[in-house]
Amino acid sequence: MKKRIFVSLGIMVFFLSFAVTASFAESWIIDSKSNKLPKDLAQRVELVGGKLLKSWDFIGIAVAEFPTEADALAIETEGLKVMPDIKINWLPDEEQAEATHIGEDEGFYSYQWHLPLIEADKAWDDGVTGAGVRVAVLDTGIWYTHADLDDNIDFASSASFVPGVPDFLDDHGHGTHVAGIIAAEDNAFGSIGVAPNATLIGVKVLDQGGGGAWSWILGGVIHAVNVDADIINMSLRGYIKKSGTDYYTSRYASQLLATMNKVLNWAASQDVLVVVAAGNEMLDLNHIWDYAIIPTEAGNCIAVSATGPTDAPAYYTNYGTSVVWVAAPGGDFMYGTLGGILSTVPPPPGAPPGYHWYSWYQGTSQATPCVAGVAALVLEKYGPMSMGRLKNILANSAEDLGKPGKDDYYGRGRVNAYEAVNNKK
């Protein structure tokens, strides 16, 4: 059957808001300071009327249900902390309207301005396409029947951590767009990704509305490492108020942040590069005081800010030298619809069968997979390496824009794929 294409003008509009919305996910996270769970944990939980839902003994984290907060705290000891599994929105507010190198035979390549800008085409000409590198996309899932994605997905390693949703099929759209930026296939059809021969692992950690419980994110990271992902892409962000809200106290906030740090640092210790979005609220992340942006500020990750078609910082991007490691094209609709990043999306409700859909979005969510794709190219070129060395290659090969050296908007610079695969530092 001939593949058919439909392009939707998907315009995302971001709103600056410090309203931290949260709800209780009806479960509790248990974190052991010693990284070892008590052998009788299930019995302790059951003794107070609770139920152990899942546990990761090798890192000392578990999830359980309890009738009341008092019951949950009854199992807490000096080395065993219990905290509410809060659920927050991890995606920005959005509005979407209906909307001779290998790339040149892709129908929409001419609209993918970000690829020649970061010189991905020159890296491909050198034979580097990300083959053999595994990239986990922790997001809303992947629309895995899309003709530009299906052959690059490791279905056996993909999973959903959203309760009641056993399949990682994308029911939102965000994760599919991210996945296409990383590894849309080199198949003479549609679009092409930065690393078109990389392997994608879909890890659904967000529901249809972009929400997710803390434990879903933690579980997704642990799963990605356990199925041998080389890179984890987290194009998501959530804000947590350090002084607490109606749903969690300052003590719980501190414990939740510590547990997220623990899991992400563990991933880094396994030499898995975690690439995260800086966020789209135009905030100076050096000075947000009572708030923490997660996972942007958590663990040994690299955070990515966004640029537009002229390499200027995108109008919406968060910034700050304390957080931003590198910048990458994220799109900017100040330059019109074509100033966004074109990538794969699921079909809209009621769409005719047999079509494959694409859309322009903007955001640090789009910049982050550009960096993940470049990292995949580096790993194919040089083979497995320490996460620290990979971070340094990305930084040392980046184009130094803005103020010389490290700066608020570009970090160490805007990534360059060709320079990265020719940089042995």
Image: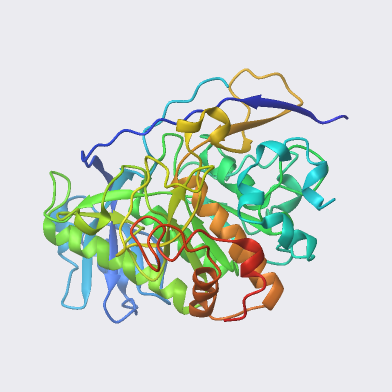
Q: What residue lies at 21% left-to-right and 64% top-to-bottom?
A: 255
Q: Is residue 45 visible?
A: no
x, y percent for residue 48: 20, 60
Residue 316 position (above or below residue 128)? above
- Nearest the camera: 373 or 283? 283
- Nearest the camera: 49 or 257? 257
Q: What residue lies at 56% left-to-right and 46% top-to-bottom?
A: 178
x, y percent for residue 31: 28, 69
x, y percent for residue 353: 73, 23
- The quarter in which the C terminus is drawn is bottom right
Residue 29 placement, left or right of 349: left
Q: Is residue 422 visible?
A: yes
Q: What residue lies at 29% left-to-right and 65% top-to-bottom?
A: 322
Q: What residue lies at 63% left-to-right and 42% top-to-bottom?
A: 113
Quarter of image, res 424? bottom right
Extreme residue in the right direction: 1
x, y percent for residue 142: 60, 44
Quarter of image, res 132? bottom right
Q: How many marks?
A: 0
- Nearest the camera: 50 or 422? 422
Residue 286 placement, left or right of 227: left
